[in-house]
Amino acid sequence: MEFKPILNATDQVPLILGPCSAESYEQMEQTIQSCLALNPQIIRAGVWKPRTRPGQFQGMGEIALEWLADLQKKFNIPIATEVANPQHVEACLKQGLHTLWIGARTTVNPFYVQEIADALRGEKVSIMVKNPMNPDLALWIGCIERLYKVGIEHIAAIHRGFSFYGNSVYRNVPRWQIPIELRRRLPGLQLVGDISHISGSVAHLREIAQIALDLNYDGLMAEIHCDPNTAKSDADQQVTAEYFQANVFSKLIKRRVDSNSIIFNDKLNQLRNDIDQIDHQLIELLSLRMKIAEQLGLEKKENYISIFQPHRWDEIVERLSKYGKENNLSQEFIFSLIEAIHIESIQHQSKMMNLD
């Protein structure tokens, strides 16, 4: 697949800015006006809001599309909104809104994605695809493929983080390895970091934005509201344009991909060699652990004991989470690591317990 860019490469980090929801014409106008000093390439605003629970603000609907269409002409800047079904697509195109995104709750459903793709067949649009709620790279890629197959070339991916069961400092854990793998498989695809949805609060916006830039993301998406305290949805993660400029954007460092310095490259190679050696040792230790797990499987088989003992699993999680914290490792990382090792261990034990 050969994709065409949605964001233009410039000396400034490309930005997609705007409120979580379009609440009124005046709110949108004030927010866009405040964002102009940051030179955003696209303004974002939700019109239909697929909320987690009923009774929450679900967007203004089609009436808001008229506001966006008028403001798009007034400010001469593309305005993007989320679509979740063919009816949304039709309503947006009717108003001349040709920059769209598919949200995380829609990306998870291939049926919905295909319906949206069919509605966009033959249309000249730019569309961004948010990662699915769960960490499923195949679903993310599948959504992009469905859009590409109906003739859409201007496609970008939005990394907005993933759901996590447990405690986390983020609203949606980044799981950086997944968007990195997406770029490896689809190298021409632009990648945008949705720092607001990953952070879930003001506290981590700068941190997430800097990591995204250090991973060579093509742009950042942030939720900007003219008055976040009165926002009807996701108020905790929205900031004013002035706050974003002073506390996030102005403090970001845009780094180079590589360097011509011989001294630097020599040091880098030395450190990478050290990491490679440790990685090999980790693999060897994991292999040894699985051999012991197979011995456990044989012992359990002979004594008619089930593979999984909940109390043992709870003890491992509690002990290693504490040990990981003492060694400056995040709870998300430790839990993911323990879980992956546990799954592999179960497979090895199961193999031994089911030998004839």
Image (tube, helix red, strand yellow):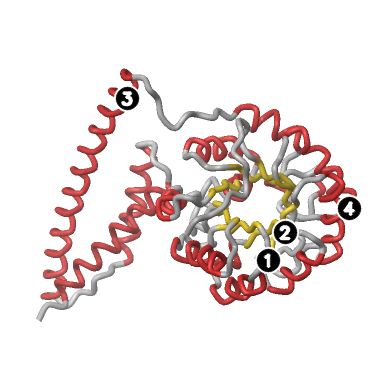
Counting from the top left corner in percent of width and height, residue 30 is at 86, 43
**Is residue 204 shown above or below 87?**
above
Relative to 311, is 18 above or below? above
Label 4 or label 2, whichever lies nearer to me, is: 2
Residue 269 sits in quarter: top left
Q: Residue at x 78, y 69 (%)?
A: 91
Residue that mark 3 sits on: 265
Q: Which residue is mark 2?
A: 98
Q: Which mark is residue 346?
A: none
Residue 123 disc label: 1
Quarter of the figure with residue 63:
bottom right
Q: Give amino acid for label 4.
A: Tyr
Residue at horizontal 82 percent and vertical 61 percent from the top? 65
Q: Are marks 1 and 2 in contact (CB under 8 Å)?
A: yes
Q: Secondary structure at mark 1?
A: loop
First of labels 1, 2 by sequence position: 2
- Mark 4 — residue? 25
Q: Position of residue 247 (x, y in %)?
A: 66, 30
Label 1 and label 3: CA atoms lie apart by: 47 Å
Q: Quadrant of residue 267?
A: top left
| Secondary structure of residue under mark 2 | loop
Query: Which is nearer the N-term, disc 3 or disc 4?
Result: 4
Could you tell me how far apart the alpha carbons at marks 3 and 2 are, in whole angstroms? 45 Å
**345 shown above or below 110:** above
The front one of 241 and 73 is: 73
In this picture, residue 39 sits left or right of residue 279: right
